[in-house]
Structures are given as C-alpha cells and as structure tokens.
Image (tube, rainbow, N blue to C red):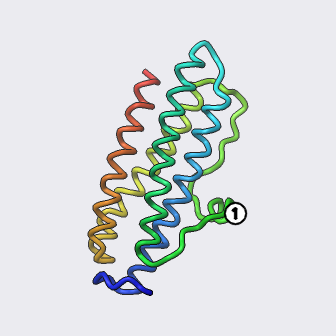
Amino acid sequence: MKPAIGITDANLQAVAQALSKLLADEYLLYTKTRNAHWNVEGPDFYAQHKFFETQYEQIDEFIDEIAERIRALGHYAPGSLKSMLQLTSLTEDSRSDNDSKGFITELLHDHESIIMELRGLVSTFANQYQDLGTSDYVTGLMEEHEKMAWFLRAHLR
C-alpha cells in the first residue's frame, strides 16, 4: 500500500532515490571506518582503534535510519554491496599505509563530501519535493556529520 502522506508519487520516488545514494555513501563510509578500526597501526593504536569504533557505530545507526526512511516513503532500500558501489559518490580507499593520520584525513574528506551533499538535499527535499520531514531528518544528519568531522579534524592538529 502506498503512503498517503501529502507527497506525490513522483516526489516520493525522487526522495527515495536521493536517500538511496546517501545510504550507499554512508555504507561505504561505514566500511572505510571499520577498515580503519581493524587496521590502524602506530603508537596511538589503542586510542585510535577505540575512536574509529565509536565512529563506525554511529554511522551504523545512520545507515539503519536512512533505510527505514526510504521504507517509510514506500520504497525499498538498496541492500547489496553491488548496488551500494553503483550508487555511492565516494571512492574506496587505495592506501598503502595504516597510520591514523592517513585514515583520519581520508575519513574527514568523506564526511565533508557527505555534509555538502546533505546541505543541498535540505532545501531540495523541502522546496522541490515538498518533503519537510525528510528535509528535517537530513538537517539533523548533517549536524551529526559536522560533529564527527570536527572530531576527526581535531585529531589532525
């Protein structure tokens, strides 16, 4: 049964597609953060290992919330690695070193990319697609990513 929530089918479809791309970005960021957690090396290993764990746990919550938002709008969330890689705008890492500074720099760049995408989606969802609920949701998500980026940036000082 289609949702009857005051948003046209075409707009619901467009929002779900944009959220699917966002979900893929979050999923790749989650994987990259897990990789950092597993593979970081150096004198700051333990602190960084725990820090990356905190970050990937938070991203895991984002992933679930985005997928549930897609479902609430009457669409299916992408659920395969293949679909995630096709939808994401991020790139998989190609690092050879496993130092914390390299991981943090790369993850920071990805968070900032997601923040810029979210910033654009806030007004697109509200103004173009008349979906204030999803606009509000991505505003909060953007704020969470801004805080996570701040934490990463603070490690680079």
Q: Residue furthest right?
A: 96
Q: Residue furthest top?
A: 43
* Quarter of the rendering containing residue 46: top right
Q: Is residue 104 left or right of residue 74?
A: right
Q: Secondary structure at mark 1?
A: helix
Which three-letter amino acid code belongs to the residue tagged 1? Lys
Front residue of 4 and 26: 4
Q: Is residue 155 left or right of residue 99?
A: left
Residue at position x 69%, y 27% in the image:
97
Quarter of the picture holding the N terminus:
bottom left
Q: Residue furthest front?
A: 1
Q: Is residue 102 left or right of residue 129?
A: right
Q: Which residue is mark 1?
A: 82
Q: Is residue 56 left or right of residue 73?
A: right
Q: Name the spot of residue 60 as percent of width and height, x first.
A: 51, 48
Report crowding for label 1: few under 14, some 14 to 19, many 20 or more residues within 10 A (C-alpha): few
Residue at position x 67%, y 29% in the image:
39
Front residue of 82 and 113: 82
In the image, residue 61 above or below residue 74: above
Q: Name the spot of residue 34 as percent of width and height, x first.
A: 61, 39
Q: Name the spot of residue 75 as percent of width and height, x first.
A: 49, 77
Q: Name the spot of residue 147 as percent of width and height, x first.
A: 35, 38
Residue at position x 61%, y 42% in the image:
32
